[in-house]
Amino acid sequence: MRGKLSVARIKALSYAALALDGLRKKRRNRTGPTQPDPIGAGAVVLDPADSKTFCILPFIHSYFATDGQASLCVLSPEPLLGGRNGGGLNVQRESLKEIFHSPAMDHARRQLLEGKKLKACAVCYDAERLGGRSTRTHYNMHWQRQRPDLMARIKERQDKAAFDKPLSVDFRYGNLCNLRCQICNPHNSSQIERDGVLSKWRSANYLRLEGRFPGEWYDAAELAEEVVDFSSDVELINLGGGEPSISRHVQKWFSRLIESGQAAKIELRVQTNLTNVNSKFFDLVVQFGLPRIFLSIDGFGPFNDYMRYPSKWRIIERNADYIAELARRSKMSIHLTPTISAYNALSIVHLFEWAAARGFDIIANHVRGVDALDCALIPDEARALAVQRMRDFLKSVTSPIPNRATIEDLCRYLEAPVDAAYAESSRKKFHAFTREIDHDRGMRFEDYCPEMAGFLGYPSDASSFGPVLNVERATFGTTT
Ligand code: SF4
């Protein structure tokens, strides 16, 4: 089943999902509004932009995770219940249409129409308490702009899906991935599933069910056909993984959408780790109406090699140049989507500068649900320094960063008070986890990030960003 680690790595192509997730109760001492949303109470919500609870996604969106488990969206940790055998709804067992029109989805829609908050959506409500924005508010505004008639349709359909087929899909074709990133888990990486050391620290096991398809469910030709049919009205596709660029079914799906002419009307958001730039895949991507590439990279230079083992920074950089050139010749946009953790909070501005120098947007997020990596474990002084660096970066950067608000939200998150007991216990987990991973990989955290290591009690030169990084930083920069 999907545990809390399924949201550890924010592989979502989502906007500014600043949230406290499962840690919110123990870590912060905040309370938010609990009364029902007056706009939605007992009636159809007419203006989602004004609602504090309503989300448009359950009416038009279909999501399944890397193990086929369905939930309202990628951010929602609650599986949709009501599957065969009494478990969660899962494409390994249930069809996409069955899930989209299931009683569980109808129930969620009804609750939203009545102005109620969904437990499954806590991540968005928490984010809004901190920064005012969330994936919920993003998509409510997005769809209001794209389809001004949509709310009238929802009013007519009530708790049923707005259409027979979704307007928006977010599919994760299995956990096939070539990396074993420090902050990831077996749910999102087949390599971690096989890694006895890292997987031991991650409770999100990968689920394989006796289901509709023999062998690996995500390789099934029947599922590929089902996806093609189910997505025939789609206007927005999110693809994460695993690593979607290495899925042959994804390429076939894209080809079919292009051949039918539908791709030209679709906004396509693809997440990639950029270790494997396959020109055939990108040739398909640029034929979509609005192609957007989201880069999962968490560290600059050699620090990348530590964080996203066994990727190599020189390959990442070469591939970044390739897709930057492709973007210059097409409508494709590129967005860096780093996840900030106790490892990279201090040095992440290097990566921001690198991205800005290439004209990439930045969508910053932070690790959630993993005590051993939570930014809360960093001493106050280090968190203040991280915030200062990010704000300095924002002041000095000269290239446009459309999602710069996500960096401001991140600063606010880092400034929020932290429960001392939680921080202390997380620090202990950080040390134990890091020691074990380092030993297994023959690497040392303090060599790759001496400054943060110094703050965390490792012997290091705490006055330096790290010698390797300092040398390489001099070779780029659009900031003043
Ligand atoms: S409110 Fe947030 S978590 Fe819930 S469905 Fe909408 S985007 Fe997903």
Image: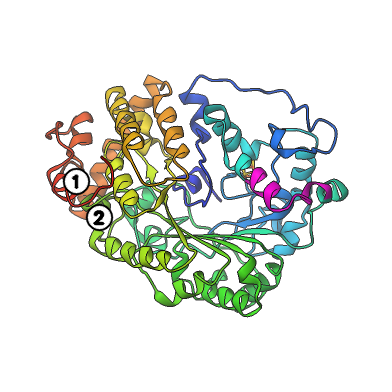
What residue span does the magenta drawing correspond to? 139-152
Expressed as whole percent of the image width and height from the top left, the position of residue 82 reads 73, 52
The amino acid sitting under disc 1 is Tyr
Crowding at dot 2, Cα within 10 Å, few <14 / some 14-19 / many 20+, comes out as some
Expressed as whole percent of the image width and height from the top left, the position of residue 339 reads 40, 45
Tell whether position 143 is magenta. Answer: yes
Q: Are marks 2 and 1 in contact (CB under 8 Å)?
A: yes
Whether 36 is drawn above or below 313: the answer is above
Q: Give the labeled residue for mark 1.
A: 448
The amino acid sitting under disc 2 is Asp
Expressed as whole percent of the image width and height from the top left, the position of residue 332 reads 48, 63
Looking at the rendered image, the quarter that the C terminus falls into is top left
The quarter of the image that holds ligand 1 is top right
Mark 2: secondary structure: helix
Tell whether position 105 is magenta. Answer: no
Look at the image and tell me whether residue 386 can be seen: yes
Whether 47 is drawn above or below 474: the answer is above
Q: Residue at x 22, y 51 (%)?
A: 476
Q: Residue at x 44, y 48 (%)?
A: 9
Q: Give the labeled residue for mark 2.
A: 305
Expressed as whole percent of the image width and height from the top left, the position of residue 208 reads 54, 62
Q: Residue furthest right?
A: 156
| Residue 467 lies in quadrant | top left
